[in-house]
Image (spheres, helix red, strand yellow):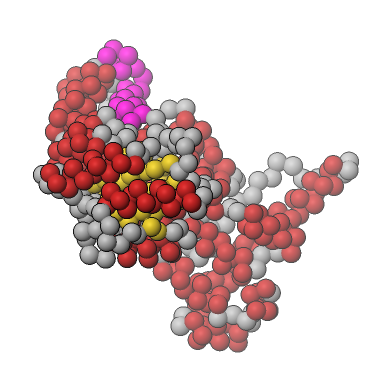
Amino acid sequence: MFESLSDRLNSTFDRLRGKGKLTEADITSAMRDIRMALLEADVNFKVVKDFVAKTKERCMTAEVMESLTPAQNVVKIVLDELTELLGETESKLVFSSRIPNVIMLVGLQGSGKTTAAVKLAYLLKKQGRSPLLAACDVYRPAAADQLATLGGEIGVPVFRGDGAHPVQIAQDAVREAIDNLRDVVIVDTAGRLQIDEQMMQEAVDIKRAVKPDQVLMVVDAMTGQDIVNVVETFAERTDFDGVIISKLDGDARGGGALSVRAVTGKPIKFVSMGEKPDSLETFHPDRMAKRILGMGDVIGIIEKAQEAADAETLASAERMLRDGFTMNDMLEQMKAVKKMGGMKGILGMLPGGQKMLNQLGGNLDESIFARNEAMIMSMTKEERERPSIINGQRRARIARGSGTTPTDVNNLMKQWGEMNKMMGRMRSMAQQAGAGKKGKKGKKGKKMRMPGIPGMGNMGGLGGLGGGNPFAGMGGSGGSEMDMLREMERQLRNK
């Protein structure tokens, strides 16, 4: 979403880093470039004016101008101001002690309220709550059917109340939740225009009838400059508590999303980064600011990895250390990468990763995952569990069965071999550590180099991208990728 803005800002910072001591003219020129970058990204002009004025005032101090690293100080100030613009701190949903809690969604037609309602229900369900969806959009054809279908896919019930008035449906949904011990009701209201008085009044009436604990406005990230008028109108009529930004993974410039917090004072609570139910993410202003400035979101990667590593995954890791690495294990690791958002999502969260994606034309061929999965599924059960038995004849058969070439199968086998060797080294080190506890001398201080992510080639963690190893120079050749991620996280926290 913010690729163009990120490129423009980083180009400005690169020019500043190329200078030794900064002059007032350098700062003025940089602020002019930042102003143009924000305006071209569709950020509201009033927001841009205030942002640039505050940033320039801070950059012109003697502390910055006379420092040994003035360019870095400018970047730090822009990061601070951008974080403040987005909200400074994470704003969580506030739940009351009553049962059920009611969350009401409002927004324009086509803003993505129905899918946002389902994604929010999925998120709350993962957190251990029992949500109920209320289909209060009686105007859009098949709106209730859409909600029922999506709700069924995630295992969340939908209260429809076909033929009833939206206010009555909302009230009945709350009673239904009480009767069935559901602790959250998510009210999906009809899309409306801010100039449609009747529809706006209906939203006010629903709010008055069910007294929601939270009113969230769903805003399309591609709305652009008009987003200011939209949120001001809804804030005046419904006094919403927070914002969900939808379609943040789209191709639009996305500057409207940067204007919401400054215009309304209402926090951004969630952002939608895709179409799947699990694509709704809690909004972290500091992390988004770092991603816009090309600093990545290492903490987010670690959180995704922890989320993907369930109890079954940990049990598999113990078995791999004991028995070795199988093709079934490789298949599970590829699924874990997909669960974390795929290679494009992971790379976009790494410092400098977005720049690399742009160098690749914004596209990353992840079809290799599908090819590798097809080859593994073309193997027999014995071959998947004991890949070492796969000879030339078997490789030819696997290639024919998966619609690939023997070369593709050879590459897959090479990747498996590297992972299996790594498991052997880890097993050996674990055994030596155990022997050391008994007083025997074991090897110490030796670190392992993690091989490439399965299916992406042997490029030190992100292979097959065509741009070399993005981890090169980020912690030395001896540490694992996770060590480097943690070190990068520590450095970002200390900036």
- Res. 212 in view: yes
> Image quarter for residue 264?
top left
Q: Which residues are magenta?
A: 61-88
Q: Position of residue 447 (x, y in %)?
A: 65, 46
Is 381 drawn above or below residue 167 in the view shown? below
> Image quarter for residue 377?
bottom right
**Image point (43%, 53%), residue name:** 176
Q: Residue furthest top?
A: 62
- Res. 356 in view: no
Q: Along the line of sight, which residue is nearer the eye, 457 or 293?
A: 293
Q: Main secondary structure of the magenta part?
A: helix
Q: Position of residue 308 (x, y in %)?
A: 54, 53
Q: Which quarter of the rendered picture does the C terminus lie within?
A: top left
**Image point (20%, 39%), residue name:** 234
Q: Position of residue 485 (x, y in %)?
A: 51, 42
Magenta-colored stretch includes residue 475: no
